Amino acid sequence: MSTNVERYTHTAIALHWLIALLIFIAFPLGLYMSDLKLSPTKLQLFSYHKWIGVTVFLLAVGRIVWRATHRPPALPDSIPRLQQFASHIVHGFLYALLFAVPISGWLMSSAKGFKTVLFGIIPLPDLLEKDKELGKLLEIVHQSLNYFLLLLVVLHVAALIKHRFIDRDDVLTRMLPGGKHA
Amino acid sequence: MIYLKEIMLFLGLLLISCHSSALEFKQVQTSESTVTFDYKQMGVPLNGKFNKFSAQVAFDPAKLATAQARLDIEVASIDTGSADGDDAVVGKLWFNAKSFPAASFISTGLKSLGGNRYEAMGKLSVKGKTLDVVAPVTFQANGNRGVFDGGFTIKRLDYAIGEGEWTDLGTVANEIPIKFHIVVNATPGKK
Ligand code: HEM
């Protein structure tokens, strides 16, 4: 392949930002919609939230496949070992949550007795039977995983700000679209 | 008062049929019977049921002309499958259960379609509106125990079930298939 592995591939960059965008929509939407009183709007928003979430899941699958077949660029040596290790841990959890958050939402919906029908056309199987108590439990799981995700995203962004403005290295730019790729 | 005529007719027919029929099914087993419905919300198939209803049936397979059926449903007993939904649909915009506590089906005729299949004609009254419905029904008798299974599909907006913002059919579809499963025992030892 190329001699320059500095930047992520265009595919990795596209998937990263598409997923980020969808999560930035799904998260506040999830918070907002739960407190609405029953109305057609509420039903629509719930469905949009689920559709966006399932799309994140599908993109995450694509991302893992890409990641497994394309080694990401190594971190520059200027970054201390411990920080490199920390970043791997955070990235690992972020990947896991890209699956865990949508899956918990999907399982919760099944347990609450609502099948998920992607875009109103493609029914997803229900892995769980309707079970009120389990539904409530999974709602808490979905919520908790989301707050964990929020925490990690905050760390992720804080680290990138530090790299950009304190360390002045290139770890942000190599994930930004529009750069040249070998 | 409105139904007085029907009730008189019903009682009259009962009298007549009791004397002539060998096996007439008319003891409805409410606890074994169900009235359920399906609905679609944002393309998601859901179902619900009515927990409280009463039924009167007088059915002799040999005398279809005198067959009678009546179903009274307590709309507030609805179970839509979600607590949120149950609270909402008894409200003014949906069933308005305060002003219209009951929905009823009263048969006007029964036709044989061959074998154990029939077609029941009747009037369905919901929320102050009465419309004709036709329901294919099967009847399965096992000794003294008979089971009616049938259903029909209503368009909810025909009965103004879901007014205002809920007239939007994109979120909750118009078609509501309703199914009934009525267990009726025969009165033994007549004739
Ligand atoms: C990227 C994916 C997702 C994110 C970021 C996300 C985020 C959220 C958030 C922040 C909430 C509010 C939790 C709270 O009440 O504090 C929420 C609620 C909810 N999510 Fe998700 N979600 C995602 C995927 C999904 C999926 C795939 C489904 C279902 C197929 C789903 C179903 C739900 C439901 C039903 C609620 C409302 C729970 C309730 O109040 O009854 N979510 N989500």
Image (cartoon, grey):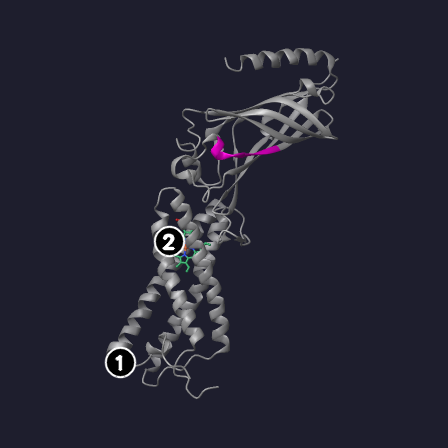
Q: Which residues are magenta?
A: B151-158
| Mark 1 residue type | Asp
Of residue B95 and residue A102, the one placed in the foreground of this image is B95
| Mark 2 residue type | Gly
Residue at the bottom extreme, as displayed: A3
Residue B113 visible from this viewpoint? yes
Task: Give the residue drawn at x 44%, y 66%.
Answer: A96
Location of mark 1 (residue): A167
- Residue B108 location, quadrant: top right
Note whether ligand 1 is within 8 Å of mark 2.
yes
The answer to whether tags 1 and 2 share a subunit is yes
Q: Are marks 1 and 2 in contact (CB under 8 Å)?
A: no
Look at the picture and state if B69 lies above or below A91. Answer: above
Q: CA distance from mark 1 to mark 2?
A: 35 Å
Location of mark 2 (residue): A30
Q: Residues within 10 Å of mark 2 (few under 14, many from 20)?
A: some
- SS of the residue under disc 2: helix
